[in-house]
Amino acid sequence: MSSAISFHHFSSPTSTTTTTKLLTPTNRFHLLKTNTLTHSSFRQLGIRCSSQNPPQSQLHTQQKGKKFSLKECAISVALAVGLITGVPALGWSGNAFAANPALPDTSVLISGPPIKDPGTLLRNALPINNKAIREVQKPLEDITESLKVAGVKALDSVERNVRQASRSLKQGKNLIVSGLAESKKQHGIELLDKLEAGLDELQQIAESRNRDGVAPKQKELLQYVGGVEEDMVDGFPYEVPEEYQNMPLLKGRATVDMKVKVKDNPNVDECVFRIVLDGYNAPVTAGNFVDLVKRRFYDGMEIQRADGFVVQTGDPEGPAEGFIDPSTEKTRTIPLEIMVDGEKVPFYGETLEELGLYKAQTKLPFNAFGTMAMAREEFEDNSASSQVFWLLKESELTPSNANILDGRYSVFGYVTENEDFLADLKVGDVIESIQVVSGLDNLVNPSYKIAG
């Protein structure tokens, strides 16, 4: 079923020509340049983001001197921001507007507040079914909401959250242990012991009215919970379709650190973004990315799109529209890959709309700030190669849990540390390196070992 959304495009006589292959949705959207997202308050720099005070200067776009292709759009899908199908340049500030911008049937409003925390989304996406550990997880996550209450009053709610989590752990510990994979059971039990001790410590923190001590301890305990849940996964839970079995596949999860040199910003000099890649729900997509990371494909590459709604990169220099596999001398492409709640294997090669699954919920939704996904050509579901983007901001067409992106683009990870600093990135900022810090052993069929 086609969407009711349409955009009209007018060329700008002041267009410049740069390369960034744009993400283009199955509907026809066009680019409207927007201002970079601004911050309402000064944020404290994280320990992995350094700052200096260089002279402020106007944002400038690096000229790369080549034409745009259909893949040259990032996904600013809002009434004021469109994804393109035409060929405007990155610096183009053309005019675009929506004609009859009605939401498509695929945008189903979901009851209850959407989950926007990347850690929670990743825990919920694990292929496990253990109610006992989830009953420990939920009250610990609820502490985040409790802390939104001003002053020490929040600590009363925190105490209740901690008591509930402790009670659930004691009552369900046997069920939790029985759910651990045999090969990981000892490690899981060690994490449970740390979790139990940590809950006692968090209770003491709340009782002593140490509000500042709550969030760091909560983060630590949720890492233990996530570790226990990962120890419940016994091997890889399904067979990837035969036509994709020889591709680089991430059969599990991996973590990468992306170090970016930030230019012309008085608050941030460089920043390291930690990204968790989920091969359980997107093995082909995540495997392709890790393989490219190991090839150092992204090292030294510039940020090519940054408009406050998305950050995008991955367009190589020259005429290629993606990664050229040295063994074939052709562009390596991967299929659209979407895992849906209730399914055991992802759907490949078709959007959920094309499959008629209008109300299906994806396992990896575009909910979190810093959701990571693959860019692709507008009318080619299986055309993704190397270009990736991070969604930054909700719009009228991309509200969490009810947007037109879920089921149309392959999400394969989330930025879990320093994600807020994605909004500080600009076109021309340089990815100094992306390095795999864990999970490389989950990559099978790595092509980087065969050819450089």
Image: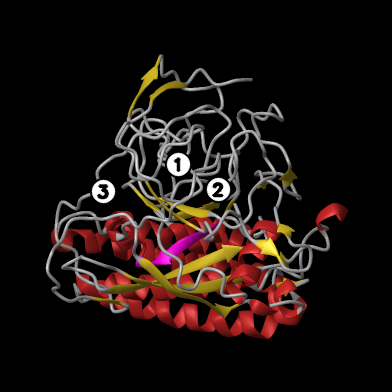
Q: Which residue is mark 2?
A: 375
Residue in the image at 53% along x and 46% along y: 365
Instruction: Report the magenta residues as a range.
Output: 412-418
Determine whether the residue tagged by mark 2 lies in a helix, strand or loop. Answer: loop
Q: Neighbour class for label 1 at 10 Å: few (<14), some, many (≥20)?
A: many
Give residue 55's position: percent from left, percent from top: 12, 69
Report the Cα–Cα distance between label 1 and label 2: 8 Å
The reply to whether residue 112 is visible in this rendering is yes
Indicate whether residue 31 is drawn in magenta.
no
- Upstream in the sequence, badge 2 or badge 3? 3
Mark 1 is on which residue type? Answer: Ile
- Quarter of the picture containing the N terminus is top right
- For the residue pair 162 and 51, the one nearer the viewer reads as 51
Report the Cα–Cα distance between label 2 and label 3: 20 Å
- For the residue pair 73 and 65, the one nearer the viewer reads as 65
Indicate whether residue 414 is drawn in magenta.
yes
Q: In the figure, is residue 142 to the left or right of 402? A: left
Q: Quadrant of residue 122?
A: bottom right
Q: Quadrant of residue 25?
A: top right
Which of the labelled discs sits on residue 351, or is there none? none
Give residue 305's position: percent from left, percent from top: 39, 51
- Upstream in the sequence, badge 3 or badge 1? 3
Q: Which residue is mark 1?
A: 75
Q: Which residue is mark 3?
A: 36
Q: Neighbour class for label 2 at 10 Å: few (<14), some, many (≥20)?
A: many
Residue situated furthest right in the rendering: 242
Q: Quadrant of residue 331?
A: bottom right
- Quarter of the picture containing the C terminus is bottom right
Mark 2 is on which residue type? Answer: Ala
- For the residue pair 365 and 19, the one nearer the viewer reads as 19
Task: Check whether the beta carbons of the residues at disc 1 and disc 2 lie within 8 A of each other.
Answer: yes
Give residue 241's position: percent from left, percent from top: 83, 52
